[in-house]
Amino acid sequence: MNERPKPIYGSRGDIHAGIDGFMDWAHVERGLSRNTIEAYNHDLRDFSEYMEDKGVAGLYDITVGHIAGHLRQLTDMGLSARSIARRISSIRGLFKYLISEGLLKKDPTEGLELPKLPHPLPDVISVEQVNLILDSVDLTHPKGLGIRDRAILEALYGTGARESELIDMTTQDIFEDIGFVRLLGKGQKERLVPINETALHWISRYRRDVRNKLTGGRRTPILFLNYRGGKLSRMGFYNIVCKWCKKAGLHEVHPHTFRHAFATHLIEGGANLRAVQEMLGHADISSTQIYTNVGTRYLHEVYDKYHPRGREIP
């Protein structure tokens, strides 16, 4: 019989302390975003409460049966397959960490299967709709905020950046001479992404005519600033994008929609899938392949519209 590792942690109980150690590791070593860490924390605290209710004393006593029972409870509570898949991922991450640290010898999540998830295609706006949004921006907005907003929208569509990547972008991340920007993605991974001349024009105009007025002479490396000269919050950024989309008559568009549009329009135009993967910063090409499905849908629309037998027969 395998001897257990010596018990770890103190009087709080090793489940709680194990979660604390995992959260610290996820933040410091992996550099995960605050939202991801908060999601892990929420999932794992629920998991530990379930174990306490079942009288499970510590990490070494948890079995695959306990975990399956927790997941059944979540299903009975009405959680979706996607939410349960996320819970499984959080629990697996915890035990993977404990084993890597030598604190456990066996992973009780082995054999657990993720629920089958639907693969909905992302909502994509057309090139014409993108142009409509860009043209809707009021450039006479006080303090030059309209120029700033146009630069933000152009950068979103021109680079396929995540909203967090643009929020964190600095003035040093723009390489106008070679037509590239540097983005800091998930896990603090850097990548260089091409950017078009139109987007560079609006960024340059914002920096020349607006940014210095927003800073009021204060020094900050952050490129896109709020009206007080500080860093934009996620909600502030979201509101900027949605404001102009709604003005253009598009009410279901948000910052990530521009990332979808960037990828889909490139692939529909004939771009290589691996090149798009690199630009999006996807670790796995399967994450990028969903955009080929969007492109396929577009081909069906064209076929149905223009082929003599593409339309339904009355």
Image (tube, grey):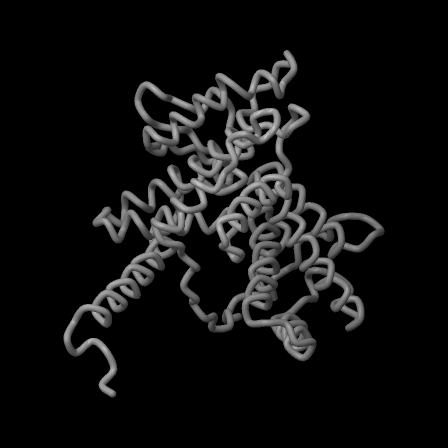
Name the spot of residue 119 as percent of width and height, x first.
42, 67
Residue that extends furthest to the top in the rendered view of this protein: 217
Name the spot of residue 87 as percent of width and height, x first.
61, 63
Give the mark count: 0
Residue 8, placed above or below residue 150: below
Quadrant for residue 25, please give it: top right
Residue that extends furthest to the right in the rendered view of this protein: 11
Describe residue 294's horizontal placement relative to residue 123 as left or right. left
Give the residue at x 44% y 41%: 134
Residue 170, placed above or below residue 89: above
Residue that extends furthest to the left in the rendered view of this protein: 308
Describe residue 115's horizontal placement relative to residue 80 as left or right. left
Quadrant for residue 62, please give it: bottom right
Quadrant for residue 140, please give it: top right
Q: Nearer the viewer, residue 141 or 60?
A: 141
Name the spot of residue 75 as percent of width and height, x first.
64, 76
Give the residue at x 40% y 28%: 181
Give the residue at x 32% y 26%: 179
In what quadrant of the picture does the N terminus appear?
A: bottom right
Q: Nearer the viewer, residue 152 or 22?
A: 152
Name the spot of residue 213 as percent of width and height, x first.
60, 17
Residue that extends furthest to the front in the rendered view of this protein: 140
Q: Nearer the viewer, residue 17 or 183?
A: 183
Give the residue at x 25% y 88%: 314
